[in-house]
Image (cartoon, rainbow, N blue to C red):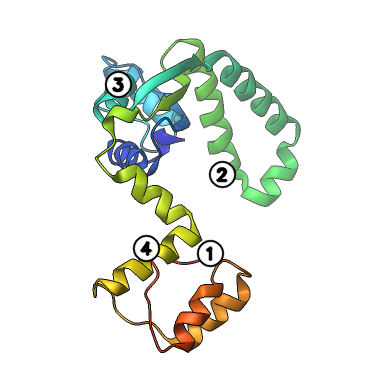
């Protein structure tokens, strides 16, 4: 849930940087409508999760981070139903919950859950689901190729060999490469040959 994170925009921007072109991110939020003030805002902020407040509406924040919204679904009704069920269940099992949580903690949690039902009914909070796509036009030149190389052990190995021949890399231990060659049948067979010939190479990332 993005709304529970303090760095919402930073999370969206960082996620877009690692998702391939055309890839998607899906997240839900509990949002407080902009423009709420006074007692209405205080009630909504009390019932909502920590960090639910945001100075920017989510569609604008998503677009600013470089995403394109593919779907936007209002889940407030389903969330309200779930909140009502939770209140009923906690009241039914109140004595058992008091033994676990303590009477004061149980009373505070139940009051907050009832307040959540109230603010959802009054439209002081919403639950929404966003599906966003990383547009291909936003990808930096060469990034897709680098992503493919990072994702493919054999490609990483070949690039490592090329870097060795160009004197760009540092050596790694022969014993480590031999162990990895044995643990990944076929994909690093040529690595063992290179090492037996006295050549050291450096792979990109890990071969896991």
The Cα–Cα distance between marks 3 and 2, rounded to whole angstroms, is 36 Å
Instruction: Return the disc, 2 or 4, that comes first in the chain's sequence.
Output: 2
The Cα–Cα distance between marks 4 and 1, rounded to whole angstroms, is 16 Å
Indicate which disc residue 208 carries.
1
The Cα–Cα distance between marks 2 and 4, rounded to whole angstroms, is 62 Å
| Residue on which disc 2 sits | 104
**Closer to us: mark 3 or mark 4?**
4
Q: Which of the 4 image quadrants contains residue 172?
A: bottom left
Residue 7 is left or right of residue 132, and the answer is left
CB atoms of marks 1 and 3 within 8 Å: no
Instruction: Return the disc, 3 or 2, that comes first in the chain's sequence.
Output: 3
Spot occupied by residue 86 in the image (x, y as percentages of width and height): 66, 28
Q: Compared to 208, does 87 lie above or below? A: above
CB atoms of marks 3 and 4 within 8 Å: no
| Residue on which disc 3 sits | 57
Q: Compared to 109, does 187 lie above or below? A: below
**Closer to us: mark 2 or mark 4?**
4
| Residue on which disc 4 sits | 159
**Closer to us: mark 1 or mark 3?**
1
Q: Compared to 193, does 132 lie above or below? A: above
Disc 2 crowd rating (10 Å Cα; few below 14, some 14-19, many 20+) is few
Q: Name the secondary structure under disc 4.
A: helix
CB atoms of marks 2 and 4 within 8 Å: no
Q: Name the secondary structure under disc 1.
A: loop
The Cα–Cα distance between marks 3 and 4, rounded to whole angstroms, is 44 Å
Identify the residue shown where x is 51% and y is 74%: 190
Instruction: Return the disc, 1 or 2, that comes first in the chain's sequence.
Output: 2
The Cα–Cα distance between marks 1 and 3, rounded to whole angstroms, is 39 Å
Identify the residue shown where x is 54% and y is 19%: 117
């Amino acid at each position: 849930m993005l709304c529970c994170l303090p760095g919402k925009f930073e999370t969206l921007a960082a996620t877009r940087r690692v998702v391939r072109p055309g890839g998607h991110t899906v997240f839900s939020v509990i949002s407080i409508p902009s423009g709420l003030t006074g007692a209405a805002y205080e009630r909504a902020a009390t019932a909502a999760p920590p960090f639910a407040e945001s100075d920017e509406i989510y569609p604008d924040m998503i677009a600013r981070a470089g995403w394109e919204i593919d779907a936007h679904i209002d889940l407030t009704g389903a969330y309200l139903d779930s909140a009502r069920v939770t209140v009923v269940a906690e009241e039914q099992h109140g004595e058992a919950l008091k033994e676990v949580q303590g009477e004061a903690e149980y009373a505070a949690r139940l009051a907050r859950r009832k307040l959540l039902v109230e603010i959802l009914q009054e439209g002081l909070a919403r639950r929404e689901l966003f599906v966003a796509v990383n547009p291909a036009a936003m990808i930096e030149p060469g990034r897709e190729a680098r992503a493919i190389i990072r994702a493919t052990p054999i490609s990483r190995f070949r690039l490592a060999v090329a870097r060795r021949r160009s004197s760009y890399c540092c050596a790694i231990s022969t014993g480590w490469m031999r162990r990895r060659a044995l643990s990944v049948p076929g994909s690093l067979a040529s690595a063992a040959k290179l090492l037996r010939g006295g050549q050291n190479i450096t792979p990109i990332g890990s071969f896991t």
